[in-house]
Image (tube, helix red, strand yellow):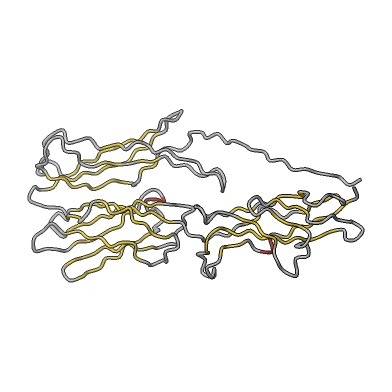
Amino acid sequence: MPVLSADVDVELDVVDRNNKPPVWDANVYGPIHIKENVTVGTVVTSVKARFVCHDMTETRHVTCRAVPCSAIPPISLFLSHSLRETYKLEAMAKDRGYPPLSRTVEVQIDVVDRANNPPVWDHVVYGPIYIKENMAVGAKVVSIKASSGIDNNPTVFYHLMPGSTAQTNKFHTFYLQQRGEQSTTWADIKVNHPLDYESIKEYNLTIRVENNGAQQLASEATVYIMLEDVNDEIPLFTEREQETVLEGEPVGSKVTQVNAIDKDGTFPNNQVTYYVVNSERNEGKDYFEINRETGEIFTKVMFDREKQGAYALEVEARDGAPSARPNGNGQPNSADYRNNVFIFKFMND
């Protein structure tokens, strides 16, 4: 008597523990320029930290809560450039876990002469700017500009500041290219490395501009970039199977269920439907049928082990949108045939 087996799904809940301190968006903030005649109570700037966590598995996503923003205290005394030029402060972000974890960051503030002006951005915040995740390396995302703030000296210098996380350009996913056009200098933000919506969905870039004055003052702008999902992933079957089926089972009997996963991030790019491959090499196509939504496989005939002891069935999983892959030809992505052949062997009832 052959050994029979059955499968069971086991669901495990992984409990998170507080083992990662907050991460600041920048390694160092500043130098931040303020004029010596700024009024008491003026807010100098604000800094932000976030709670960083990772997906437990490839398919289960964990929501990360943000650490509340910590604002630099407002000016509490009159400042004079002649008395002191630079202040260095330390900001601390602390989460609400148990035990609470914290991390500090340095904030540098430079007091400048009241007669000097920093550069002025057209906008302090740009975006959100939406781009496709398959945007080519070298393609321009946005062009931004600032004026120098100095009469008769329009020269400015732009810098894309790397942050401390992937979302803030730690790995130089984007780069800046300075471009002159008549009397205006532009900063073009371009793609430096391939993008992937399934890994990172948004970016927060800090652009710094300096003028060419005596103190070379600077100011910063923020560029928010949001990725849009494209259908660039193919469905993949979770395993290859060999099933044993009793001969003489009635037509319509369920013999197994297949499962394929598409790692695209949005519907219908990750919607999977199942098909029996209609080809001459697929010997099982006339003997089995599949539920397109669930992947359940059923018999179409009553089998006799004495006539044939085993059948190979080839099935296909397709996603729900035209492919964005270079060779997709506008058709939905489908699983590789080599990964979806299922063998059915028969035993006596």
Q: Position of residue 231 (x, y in %)?
A: 51, 60
Residue 178, position as x, y percentages in the image: 27, 65
Quadrant containing the N terminus in the rendered view: top right
Q: Residue at 41% x, 66% y: name it.
A: 137
Q: Nearer the viewer, residue 121 or 264?
A: 264
Question: Residue placed at 70% from the left, 59% from the top?
Answer: 340
Q: Quadrant of residue 160?
A: bottom left
Lateral position of residue 70 relative to residue 150, left or right: right
Q: Position of residue 116 (x, y in %)?
A: 10, 52
Number of numbered labels in the structure image: 0
Q: Nearer the viewer, residue 142 or 118?
A: 142
Q: Position of residue 95 (x, y in %)?
A: 40, 33
Q: What residue is at 80 percent from the left and 44 percent from the top?
A: 5
Q: Hey, which residue is sitting farthest top in the picture?
A: 98
- Lateral position of residue 233 relative to residue 32, left or right: right
* Left or right, 152 with reference to 145: left
